[in-house]
Image (cartoon, helix red, strand yellow):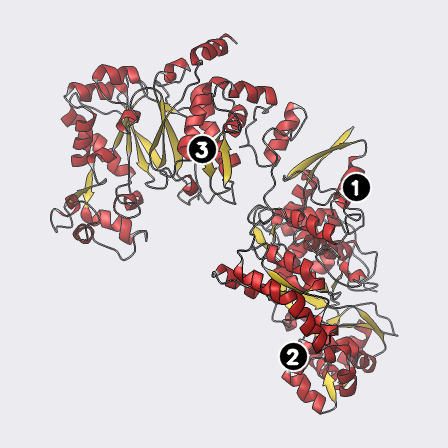
Amino acid sequence: MLRASAVAERAGVPTASLVCEGFLGQAATTSTGLGLPGLPTALVPGHVDVQTVEELRRNVAAVTVDAVIRNLTEAPARAGAAVVEPAAADIVFAGSFDEVNRFFYENDWSDGLPIVPPTPPRVAEFLRFSDRPGETELGVLLPDKRRATVWNVAVNGVMAGCRPEYMPILLALVEAMADPRYGVEHSGNTPGAETLIILNGPIIKELGFNYEQGALRDGIQANTTIGRFWRLYLRNVAGFLHHRTDKGTFGNTWRVVLAENEDVLRRIGWTTVAEDEDVAGGNAVTISRYTGGGVIASVFGNAPDRMLPYLSDALVGKVGWELLFTVGMGVGSQRPLLILSPILAETLAKGGLDKAGLKQRLFELARIPAAKFEKYVGEWTNFVPGRPSLTGLVKAGHIPAVFAESEDPERLVPIVCRAEDFMVAVSGDPLRTNAYAFAHNGILGYPTTKPIRLPADWARLLREARAR
Amino acid sequence: MESLWVLLPAGQRVSGEWIDDTLRVRAEEKGLLARTPLAGEFPRQRVELIRDADPGAEVNRLYRARGWTDGLPILPPTLGRVDEMLGGSPLERHVVLGEVEPLGGVASVEKVAVNAVMAGCEPAHFPVVLAAVRAVLDPAFNLRGVQTTDENVAPLLIVNGPIAARVGINAGWGALGPGWPANAAIGRAVRLVMNNLGGGWPGAVSFAGLGQPARYTLCLAEREDTPWPPLHVEAGYRPEQDTVTVLRAETVINVTGGLDELASVMGSAASLFGILHSGKPGVILSPFTARRLAQEGWTRADVRRELHARGRLDAETWRRSWIHSAVRATDWPEWARAAAEGGGIPAVREPDDITLIVAGADLPIPQHAYCPSWGHPPCRVTREIVLPADWAARLDEPREPGPPRG
């Protein structure tokens, strides 16, 4: 009976379920089990089995009918049993370092590496680096719909092994995570792409980030622990867990923070990644999800014309099914990333290219045959149903004309919709001619940049932190 | 001060809610908090650290007060014990078997293992427990009804195949009685799953008026050493396959004698619910009788036909029964109403609705049992018992001898 009511309620049809007195508990229990706690019920006093027709008529008229009318005319209370979790400042455990670590790991709160126990004094130290109180909400994160707060940013920062002065960066990261443009809810999808954090601004040097040799390697506290924080926060606040909310087929380890070499950028007159994403000046984080990447070793040549074919070929080589983000799911949301070592950037700049010019050249050179492009999105995968042709998509006005400059299946088409869809960063060993290319996950982790807000007395706090 | 790392056996819904929050409210409404004073009061975690001079006793005290036991002491489900239990699993710990009605706690393999440890299962029992849980989660079993009805129904688990002897599930002497760890623990594990993941707390969610001892455990193996093919082979499985068959048993009625006496008990008010729902009851036949009948040329089907033909409820008894006046005439199935016109209603719609099981000791004054069915839809659910890949190697490890056949 209640199952029928649940189906009707789900379809938007008001219901009244008549329930004999002794079965009200069952009704409440069952409606909870049906996922609709508080399904409207109308009490029938006693039990109908033992009532005469007259008694039943009297009971229904006196009690049941009013309830039925209320059931059908008033919005039912939908207050279910909320998920009860510890309050922010609750002490959930007291024990030795080893016990704390076992406890956190066994309760799915850790990533398998030891955590720093998030004790109240440690959390308080982090909170000093925010002008906003701990309870400040930064957003609500799917899939667990948990509130992101300054407090739980601090807690996860402590656990990840961050230093308190990283807190402004952690807060900016979570603001970016909570931005709908980024799409954190997709973080458990099956291709299992992983986020890369790109850092800009004076804070790179203030906090000792590595932006030279081994820029994407763990081993430097700031780069490494903030990368770990990202994944811990996805676990503990957003709620992505192995075998449950995470469906990444393979996934990969979290990436360390990529800090740009801004000295070089300034010297050659190039914009930073944050500036390219319209967050000008100062400190900023940019997050974006990449399906995979790889190094482009030994880029040979002393001028753009000699270097660009290789770099373009590498970008093309990293992209396959991801082309669906170029023409299918979220047209134009494919944002491949090219990281240049400083010496490569300087050589390209010396050859007369600024960033916009470089992106334009990549747009012209990083191309693949239209027939192969169509195979990626319509034949080898089933991402774009109906196997549409690029010319058809152009004619329908879905994608730019550049994809249909002729009908020739072997014509070359770009891998992104617009030149500025390419992203270019400068980092890594300054004097080695290597680059790195990342294929992008489109709208399932779209580049999102947020300014980093420093506390009012940042200079003093930083001085104190360094002195400790 | 000693410490134990224990897992929580309680049910969490897909949405993350713990069913204990609902149970707490129900228990309060019904004035039942004296039984479970700590209902819903526990850390919302997977694992808890219990520190106490006697942590095993403390786990027992806490788990009982939180409503997580059947009243008997449990074995604390420590991380180590649960890992060992999962060593006997053919499935990874995170695999989800389903949601347990009525409150919908998610039955992951790990949660089932926690409850199996508490029930006293050995790792070798775990494949049977998993198959049994799968069976009661089959919609045909109507677990929601079983858990919430005011009747006293309990799942009856019948194990077939070589696994029964290998892990010590008794089919012989006192198979439904105390003394057999596998029979006791496997049935109890299913009950704890129903209690802790489904929320079938007596009086709060489960409204069984009287209950029955079978709600602690009701699990046995079949005697496969008669000339007849065993139950699972009749159902189409190969003899070397292992299965568990689950029935909804309203109770277990002892019948000493022969087919006459069985037919007599079946043709009584005991079968009223079964007739109403065209149910599938169980008949446990003594191996002595089975062997004798087989020697005389009877097949299992012959026995079922005989019981169907002779176990008739007198139409007048039916008409005078409380249930006859409680339900509409049209609620009775066509076959029953037609049979009533002829003066007597068979206990089942057709002979094959009887689940015939051979079990018990080889006593010359044979004891059988009739397990009338409750509820709808008609239900006899069989699941193959899937073994872990390293099962053969595990069985080579020394273990205690199995029970005698009787």
Residue type at mark 1 is Arg
Viewer-proximal residue, A13 or A127?
A13
Viewer-proximal residue, A282 or A113?
A282
Residue A251 in view here: yes
Could you classify mark 1 by the number of other residues whose Cα lies within 10 Å: few (under 14), some (14-19), or many (20 or more)? Answer: some
Residue marked by disc 3: A253
Image coordinates of residue A418 in percent, x first then y, are: 20, 38
Residue B356 in view here: no
Element on which disc 1 rests? helix
Residue type at mark 2 is Asp
Viewer-proximal residue, A446 or B89?
A446
Where is B363 relative to B302, above or below? above
Element on which disc 3 rests? loop
Q: Do badges 3 and 1 share one subunit?
A: no
Q: Which quadrant is the C terminus of chain B positioned in?
A: bottom right
Residue A53 as seen in the image, left or right of residue A378: right
Viewer-proximal residue, A269 or A290?
A269
Where is A367 relative to A300, above or below? below
**Quarter-of-image position of residue A320:** top left
Where is A337 relative to B352, above or below? above
Q: CA distance from mark 1 to mark 2?
A: 47 Å
**Quarter-of-image position of residue A278:** top left
Q: CA distance from mark 2 to mark 3?
A: 61 Å
Q: How many numbered badges does the structure rendering display?
A: 3
Badge 1 sits on which subunit?
A: B
Q: Do badges 2 and 3 share one subunit?
A: no
Q: CA distance from mark 3 to mark 1?
A: 42 Å
Residue type at mark 3 is Thr
Residue A95 as seen in the image, left or right of residue A406: right
Mark nearest the camera among 2 and 3 is 2
